[in-house]
Image (spheres, rainbow, N blue to C red):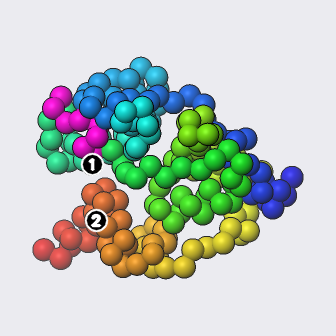
Amino acid sequence: MNSKEVLDQPVSKYIIRDFIVVDADKSVVEAARLMREKGLECIIVVENGKPVGMLTLRDIVYRVVAEKREPLKTKLGEISSRPLITVDPKTKVSEAIKLMLENDIRRLPVLDSGKIIGILVLRAVVGNILEKNILLADLEVPEGVSCPYCGSIFKNREELSKHIDRVHIGAGILEGAAKRRH
């Protein structure tokens, strides 16, 4: 199968159907325990039964631990990534990857008639493509500002700045450069 055929396939072929849904009023501790029990890296956050956000292990580290918030008191609704960006099962793999790149996300819930049927994980899709020696050259690269550290593309400098602060500075990538200046 060539790259064009893979990128034209529906996302339904690549979704992970093992996911959990947790109410926004639950604590981070409750969510972390569920994630550990199920061996999952993310959960879907719901309010009144409607999916409204996603919480990842990274969110827990950056938005709770790094900010010294109390995990027992912090509710999922306070720290989950919103709005929840989704696709339907018929969305092409290429369109889903482009959407993830444009929004600096790695996971996309897949909804069918308003109900979550699975999650598309960028690593799983790209891993499948790379294992088959398929180049991603067929993807349309979004226009915008490129991150000098990882190459991600953003709509404007403000989004790039937020990304650098959240991902690279938060991850300590720039610490070496800062220490050399002092």
Labels 1 and 2 touching (C-beta < 8 A) = no
- 46 drawn magenta: no
* x and y percentages locating residue 76 in the rendered image: 29, 37
Q: Mark 1 sits on what residue?
A: 62
Residue 42 in sight in this render: no
Q: Amino acid at mark 2?
A: Asp
Where residue 165 is drawn, which disc sits there?
A: 2
> Residue sitting at 48 percent across and 68 percent down?
152
Q: From what the image shows, is residue 82 above or below residue 29?
A: below
Q: Amino acid at mark 1?
A: Tyr
Which residue ends up furthest to the top in the rendered image? 37
**Label 1 secondary element:** helix
Which comes before the other along the chain, label 1 or label 2? 1
> Residue sitting at 68 percent across and 44 percent down?
89
Q: Residues within 10 Å of mark 1 (few under 14, many from 20)?
A: some
Q: 123 or 104, which lies in front?
A: 104
The answer for how far apart the CA atoms under marks 1 and 2 are is: 11 Å
* x and y percentages locating residue 52 in the rendered image: 40, 43
| The quarter of the displayed image where residue 33 is located | top left
Q: 137 or 17, which lies in front?
A: 17
* x and y percentages locating residue 175 in the rendered image: 24, 64
**Label 2 secondary element:** helix
Question: From the viewer's perspective, is 150 left or right of 15?
Answer: left
Q: 100 or 88, which lies in front?
A: 88
Q: From what the image shows, is residue 58 above or below residue 40?
A: below
Question: From the viewer's perspective, is 73 left or right of 58?
Answer: left
Question: From the viewer's perspective, is 78 left or right of 114?
Answer: left
Question: From the viewer's perspective, is 37 left or right of 170?
Answer: right
Magenta range:
72-79
Residue 55 in sight in this render: yes
* x and y percentages locating residue 71 in the rendered image: 19, 33
> Residue sitting at 38 percent across and 23 percent down?
34
